[in-house]
Amino acid sequence: MNEHAREPLGALKSILKRQYIWGIVAIALLLLINVIKEPTYLAISVGHNGHLVGNVIDILRSAAPVMMIAVGMCLVVATKGIDLSVGSLMAVAGAVAMEFLSSAPNTPGAAFAALGLVIVVTGALGAINGILVSVVGLQPFISTLVLMLAGRGLAKVITGGQNTSATNDVFRWFANGYVFGIPVVFVLALAIVIVVGLVVRRSALGLMIEAIGMDPKAARLAGINRRALLLTVYIAGGVLAGFAGVFATATVMTVDVSRTGYLLELDAILAVVIGGTSLAGGKFNITGAAIGAVLIATLDKTVVFLGVSSSASPAFKAIVIVALVLLQSERVRRMFRQRRAARPAKREVVAA
Amino acid sequence: MSALLTTPTPVAPQEPRGIRSLMQRVSHHVEALPTAASVVIFVGMLVYGEIAYGRILQASTLSNLLINNAHLILLAVGLTFVILTGGIDLSVGAVIACSSVAGVMLINAGWNPWLAMVLMVLIGTAFGAVSGVLIQYFNVQPFIATLAMMFLGRGLASILSTQPVRLGDDSAARLLSTKIKIIDGPKVNDLVITPSVIIAILVVVIAFVILHRTRTGRTVYAIGGSEQSASLMGLPVAATKLWVYVISGSLAGLAAVLYTSRLGSAQNITGLGWELDAIAAAVIGGTLLTGGAGFVLGSVIGALVLGLMNVLITRDGGIPPEATTIITGGILLVFVLLQRAVLAKQRE
């Protein structure tokens, strides 16, 4: 994922060139605001049973589901697509898991069976997206919009409109447990980011995905199997959303069919954009998407910490996303460039 | 549904001449095929409902269909403009939430209700203008720009209030949903109309005239056909693209007024998923998602099909109401696929 820099200064420079550095800066700024309000905000203490406790740990924990769907979204966006169904798929995953566990014994086996079932169901739904996009050739946002619409209905049908809850200690541990004092869910999310990153970047897969996003025709001439690759990417997006749904529901061991994963597709898109992946497809950056997810979690926690209702945080995210797409837009970039270069060129901007 | 399956039957080359000439005649108006299909479906649903459940084809049910879907008709008309240019507006549901919560709170704070209602429309206009500027002048993809507005609208509505806010029982805003009897039928079978329905019908008529009888309308279609050609022909592409989002936003604002007046309350989760209903209505009515072809009246039919579907599902009782969105999604998908088939036919 990194270019090899020969000297430390060069390494620093290449890091500074990446767009996600602004994500890190933004995280630092938000944390700073919180520290100003409450000087002990960053404090991490060791809880009674060896777990790390603190606001930062909370942020990492809540960043985990977004990290998972952001990784999937990152790949989908790189193919010039979009997956609007991930939030609904999370609800479906939660509904499937809870319905299964509510009638299953409280054993580790049942927990893993539920996980397997979720992978199958969300993988199949992701495959529907993939087939509509790759074989039928529909616009990605329409095919996934249909599932976004129908997915929540499906989740409601699965649970019969109820918010099903269940008990399973192992399943609960996925979301609330700790490994070496760090929340399991964050460790798993990080592992997913690293594994997907390695698979994509250490093989030609990443280049192929970028090729599809940049120029589908050229990619086909280069012998890339567009259909199979698109299908794989959407299935991966679906399964990752399934994981995220499992973790989101396992925290409380209840699926809220209308609120689990609600608007989270937008969080994922935001994370991807913050990470420096252009929505126009092509080059992608999984590390950036993961950092973007942490930024979103930080933003959410900060908004609540500052005493604003948590349901208001979409407004702040909207402002961030508008600012980011503006920065990505050609017109604004040209304006910056021209201001730096010469004054008289300004007229052209107005004329254009 | 059966009409859907039978209409676009591909004709084998060895077919007799009569059918082939019929197919040729149909293929001249092939872009009207989805609209025709939706009309057939609407009539089919009416007939089926009348036979299976009864009391569908009567004045009170039909006037309620209009009264309960006036807002959806407005949204569908707005989205028709946007989709015709090849764009999309995902923000309409959130705009309704923001505008209706703000409006009800202002009225409850003692503002003149009429002034507040004008402001509600203007809130929608503002959202549409921001989307339009982002899309036209900063080259943001339409669904991203309007997705951001969807976030913003929901967030602002939640900042205003997370609790349902109610209009006073004697508020002037409720006047828009006063029921006016046109024909006093036997028992409760009256033909009823509300000022909201009249507003919706007026909007449909104006939109129809603009789209089919004015230069702006032609430009909207031209942009959807090919934006590049439209601008090479010297059509005001930039201004028109801005306008369609302003129109869609304003109609969402107006829809908020009508809906609030009917329901008498507003909440930050009002209008959840309505953007999808509106898109589905436009698509069912025959508006091509890639832009360039479609009819306002088709979208109205599309909205009525969705409304009637809800009535039938309620009457049936056997289908869980949760399944409504699945059915809507399924219908949307079928129509999008039908569009693709029609497009492929056109290209031949």
Image (spheres, coloured by chain):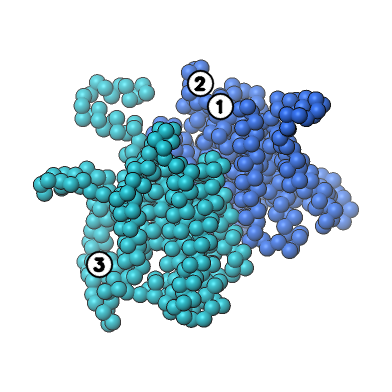
Q: Are marks 1 and 2 on the same chain?
A: yes
Residue type, label 2: Ser
Q: Residues within 10 Å of mark 3 (few under 14, many from 20)?
A: some
Q: Nearer the viewer, residue B247 or B289?
A: B289
The secondary structure type at the circle numbered 2 is helix
Residue A346's spot in the image, x, y percent? Answer: 28, 24
Task: Say if mark 1 contacts mark 2, CB within 8 Å.
Answer: yes
User: For mark 1, what is the residue?
Assistant: B225
Residue A134's spot in the image, x, y percent? Answer: 51, 43
Seen in the picture, residue A31 relative to B79 is either above or below; the reply is below
The secondary structure type at the circle numbered 1 is helix
User: For mark 3, what is the residue?
Assistant: A41
Q: Read off the chain for label 1.
A: B
Q: Give the residue at the far right of this rendering.
A: B186
Q: Which mark is residue B11?
A: none
Q: Tell me what residue is drawn at x 49 percent, y 76 percent.
A: A110
Residue type, label 1: Gly
Residue type, label 3: Tyr
Q: Say whether residue B308 is visible.
A: yes
Q: Are marks 3 and 2 on the same chain?
A: no
Seen in the picture, residue A216 relative to A288 is either above or below; the reply is above
Q: Tell me what residue is drawn at x 34 percent, y 43 percent.
A: A207
Instruction: From the image, state the color of chain A.
Output: cyan
